[in-house]
Image (cartoon, helix red, strand yellow):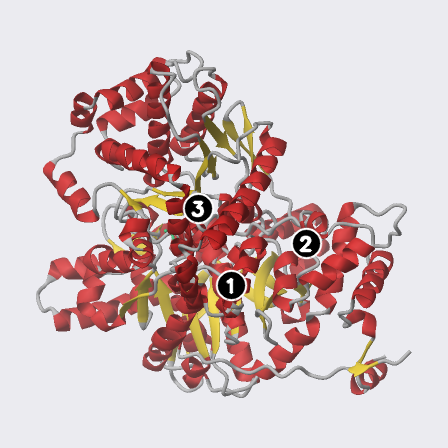
């Protein structure tokens, strides 16, 4: 049979037209064929999901040529590959996006229609792979999209969680978490590559020995071994020939796991051990920031990083590279500190397994790695107790000690006698309990360090990584985040995309700066009215979705005011609620009051263990109950909490928004990326000078942005002076009324204690300065309500916002990473010709 395989490989590949053809007729035939031969169904018994699967395979067939051609074009020694290591990839549904990238949306829509079905309905069948919590994971997905669009050779490496981020249901106003069984019906977009499995060691101890050449070496005797099986998903470039790879690792027990146990007769024990191994890639930790310091989390991080680094080295050697030159063919980006154990693991692989001397290995490591920081929140900075770390990764702890010893020597040389600085810079945090500081490991082991918005990068240098900045200022730069216009405009807002292309051509899709050309339509009455009509259509669609999901009827002509993001105190969803209650009180006092009708829409998940965030969800729903059902309000205000915010739902929300809530305490949101998606789709922003809001306002023009709140400097100063929230409570009657209502139970069906923890926080600590920013926010919101009454002016501002968001394309961000950090360039992909079968 070996002979037969070899003969088959030598013959030219025959690809039937049904697997490649793009005509409507061929697509229809292929679709029917896949339903029969892959799903094993015919039309009599097929479910909607069967049809979705049949279509997904039809599309997959049509991208394989690009994928294989890309692998071939890139598998060369002179090609530099970007490896994006991330614990999260929040890709969103693939089908629609792949249709856009292949440029076959219209043909496929017609083929499906002629097959008696509806394309949108099939697209809606896809369970999105929710392998991320929020901004950080979604950023990784946008970056993969741009890397492929720019034809940069790149691999995304992460974990193939069996359960992604939980599905959220709302019961009695509270969040309930449901397991996300996204793989239940199979995943047509991935291909398992068991032949590329790698081994990962864990636990145990180390032993010193002297090798044949008389060199002092260390060997790691692990307690257990697991294997990583790669699952590959193609990431298509927009209308080019490139298809990069997202490679996610699944943990399994090694083949031989049960050998001993079988002999001893402990069958159940063996199976247990197998299940234990597979736990590693079982579930995504649902914490956004801060992280949870659990052993299994560290196992996850080490597992996917070790698999990925072994894979990178294997490829490098396969194309004939020398390890000393690794940094010439590999740029490894650490998406936050989650994969930063990679610094120690690469050192171990080079020194222990490939017998390279320490200094050379350290040069290679530093030149290969770069680190992106995503947060300033102190509680989100990862650190692992030394004891836990050492018992799981004994060899890595030794390596980290050695890195630290040499690193601190360098510091002493540069700052003699500065012991305070040594303690602050050390990779080890001393104290009764010692910790490994992962941000320090990442910073010491990388040649480049960046923040994700201009303000954030400045604050990093001034605050969190100040000592590293003083030590190596040349490592630091800013890379303001971006989002892909393919998913976030073309796919989500096709009507708007059509209008834009009709007006300025379609170059903007690959070069978002071209949106500037829309400026000349900002005052054009005809254009304005089409712009408004599209927004209204999108709002009407969202209203219909809201009705289906919640039963609530909202008016598409009201101002759609939207805050969607993870629920977190620093993001201040509850500040938004304080304004809603304020408006409600005004209407109660004077039901005749003229106000701009508004629909307040919220969406977002709370970490399951984050009590205050869950209470904020309950608060939104309680206030919604009161406001939505009070006849005095007369439907002029509506409050909606839409359950289960995810990428799919985001695609409905951004196009329908008119006001984007970006109201975090200044200095807390590293960047934000939802802010960019809203603005591109024509929403105006009400926001603080935080994260990328600063740059959005700069681009849009201050007259087209609703600014409020303390600046970062003012926040620091106020806290330094001693902040007392009660001063604001006592000095502001409207605010006092709102807080008193929260405490009294009128907003919680008489349950007086329900919101006590919230009230207590606000009055006694208010870490995120809601009370200090309340008045400024209320006044700003009132200006928004006023501005909305002048629809012509509002539309002009809306057009200008879209027109000026070119900077926030992830293509721009990726170009900057390529030029300043990775030294990566585009590689042209030539499609390998198929031999077409004839009838
Ligand atoms: N971020 O989503 C996360 N998770 C973290 O653990 C730390 C940060 C977010 O990353 C986004 C992408 O850079 C930022 O836009 C956002 O401000 C930040 O909170």
Seen in the image, is 279 located left or right of residue 479? right
**How many residues crowd around disc 3 within 10 Å: few (fewer than 14), some, or many (20 or more)?**
few
Q: Which label's residue is closer to the chain start, 2 or 1?
A: 2
Q: Is residue 444 above or below residue 74?
A: above
Q: Is residue 753 above or below residue 365?
A: above
Q: Is label 3 within 8 A of ligand 1 (CB to nearest ligand atom)?
A: no
**Which residue corresponds to mark 2?**
261
**How many residues crowd around disc 1 within 10 Å: few (fewer than 14), some, or many (20 or more)?**
few
Nearer to us of marks 2 and 1 is 1
| x then y, percent, for residue 764 | 22, 26
**Which residue corresponds to mark 1?**
503
Q: Secondary structure at mark 2?
A: helix
Q: Is label 2 within 8 A of ligand 1 (CB to nearest ligand atom)?
A: no
Nearer to us of marks 3 and 1 is 1
Q: Are marks 2 and 1 in contact (CB under 8 Å)?
A: no
Residue appearing at x 49%, y 18% in the figure: 629
Determine which of the numbered discs, if any, sits on residue 294 in the image: 3
Q: Secondary structure at mark 1?
A: helix
């Amino acid at each position: 049979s070996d002979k037969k395989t070899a003969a088959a490989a030598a013959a030219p590949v025959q690809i039937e037209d049904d697997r490649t053809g793009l005509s409507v007729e061929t697509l229809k035939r292929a679709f029917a064929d896949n339903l029969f031969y892959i799903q094993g169904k015919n039309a009599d018994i097929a479910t909607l999901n069967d049809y979705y699967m049949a279509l997904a395979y039809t599309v997959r067939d049509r991208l394989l040529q690009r994928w294989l051609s890309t692998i071939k074009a890139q598998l060369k020694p002179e090609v530099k590959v970007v490896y994006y290591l991330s614990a999260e990839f929040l890709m969103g549904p693939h089908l629609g996006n792949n249709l856009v990238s292949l440029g076959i949306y219209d043909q496929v829509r017609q083929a499906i229609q002629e097959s008696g079905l509806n394309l949108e309905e099939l697209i809606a069948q896809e369970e999105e792979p929710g392998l991320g919590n929020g901004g950080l994971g979604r950023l990784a997905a946008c970056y993969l999209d741009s890397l492929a669009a720019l034809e940069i050779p790149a691999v995304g490496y992460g974990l193939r969680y069996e359960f992604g981020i939980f599905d959220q249901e709302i019961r009695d106003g509270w969040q309930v978490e449901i397991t996300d069984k996204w793989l239940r019906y199979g995943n047509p977009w991935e291909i398992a590559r068991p032949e590329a499995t790698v081994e990962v060691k864990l636990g145990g101890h180390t032993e010193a020995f002297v090798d044949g050449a008389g060199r002092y070496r260390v060997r790691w005797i692990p307690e257990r071994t697991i294997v990583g099986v790669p699952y590959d998903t193609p990431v298509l470039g927009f209308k080019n020939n490139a298809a990069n790879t997202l490679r996610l690792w699944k943990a399994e027990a090694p083949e031989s796991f049960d050998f001993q146990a079988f002999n001893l007769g402990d069958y159940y024990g063996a199976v247990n051990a197998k299940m234990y191994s597979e736990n590693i890639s079982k579930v995504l930790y649902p914490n956004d920031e801060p992280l949870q310091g659990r052993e299994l989390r560290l196992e996850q991080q080490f597992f996917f990083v070790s698999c990925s680094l072994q894979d990178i080295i294997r490829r490098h050697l396969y194309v004939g590279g020398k390890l000393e030159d690794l940094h010439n063919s590999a740029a490894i980006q650490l998406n936050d500190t989650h994969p930063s154990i990679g610094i120690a693991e690469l050192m171990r692989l080079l020194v222990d397994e490939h017998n390279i001397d320490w200094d050379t290995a350290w040069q290679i490591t530093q030149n290969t790695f770069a680190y992106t920081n995503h947060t300033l929140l102190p509680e989100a900075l990862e650190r692992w107790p030394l004891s836990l770390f050492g018992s799981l990764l004994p060899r890595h702890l030794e390596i980290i000690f050695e890195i630290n010893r040499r690193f601190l020597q360098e510091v002493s040389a540069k700052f003699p006698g500065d012991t305070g600085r040594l303690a602050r810079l050390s990779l080890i945090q001393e104290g009764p309990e010692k910790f490994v500081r992962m941000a320090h490991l990442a910073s010491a082991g990388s040649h480049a360090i960046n923040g994700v918005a201009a303000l954030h990068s400045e604050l990093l240098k001034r605050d969190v990584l100040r000592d590293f900045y003083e030590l190596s200022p040349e490592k630091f730069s800013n890379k303001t985040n971006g989002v892909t216009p393919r998913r976030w405009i073309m796919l989500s807002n096709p009507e708007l995309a059509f209008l834009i292309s009709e007006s300025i051509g379609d170059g903007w899709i690959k070069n978002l700066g071209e949106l500037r050309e829309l400026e000349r339509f900002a005052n054009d009455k005809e254009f304005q009215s089409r712009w408004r009509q599209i927004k209204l259509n999108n709002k009407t669609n969202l209203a219909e979705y809201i009705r289906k999901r919640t039963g609530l009827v909202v008016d598409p002509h009201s101002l759609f005011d939207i805050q969607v993001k993870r629920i977190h105190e620093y993001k201040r969803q509850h500040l938004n609620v304080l304004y809603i209650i304020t408006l409600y009180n005004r209407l109660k006092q004077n039901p005749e009051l003229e106000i701009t009708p508004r629909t307040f829409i919220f969406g977002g998940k709370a970490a399951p263990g984050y009590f205050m965030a869950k209470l904020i969800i309950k608060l939104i729903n309680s206030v919604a109950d009161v406001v939505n059902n009070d006849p005095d309000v007369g439907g002029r205000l509506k409050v909606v909490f839409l359950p289960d915010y995810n990428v799919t739902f985001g695609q409905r929300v951004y196009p329908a928004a008119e006001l984007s809530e970006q109201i975090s305490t200044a200095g807390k949101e590293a960047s934000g990326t939802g802010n960019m998606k809203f603005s591109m789709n024509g929403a105006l922003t009400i926001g603080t000078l935080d994260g990328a809001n600063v740059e959005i306002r700069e681009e849009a023009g201050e007259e087209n942005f609703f600014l409020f709140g303390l600046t970062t400097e003012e926040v620091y100063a106020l806290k330094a002076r001693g902040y007392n929230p009660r001063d604001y409570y006592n000095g502001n009657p409207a605010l006092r009324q709102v807080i008193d209502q929260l405490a009294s139970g009128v907003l919680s069906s008489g349950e007086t204690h329900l919101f006590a923890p919230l009230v207590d926080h606000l009055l006694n600590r208010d870490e995120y300065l809601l009370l200090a920013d309340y008045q400024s926010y209320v006044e700003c919101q009132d200006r928004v309500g006023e501005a909305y009454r002048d629809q012509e002016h509002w539309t002009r501002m809306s057009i200008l916002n879209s027109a000026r968001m070119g900077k926030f394309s992830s293509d721009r961000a990726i170009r900057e990473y390529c030029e300043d950090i990775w030294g990566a360039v585009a590689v042209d992909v030539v499609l390998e010709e198929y031999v077409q079968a004839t009838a």
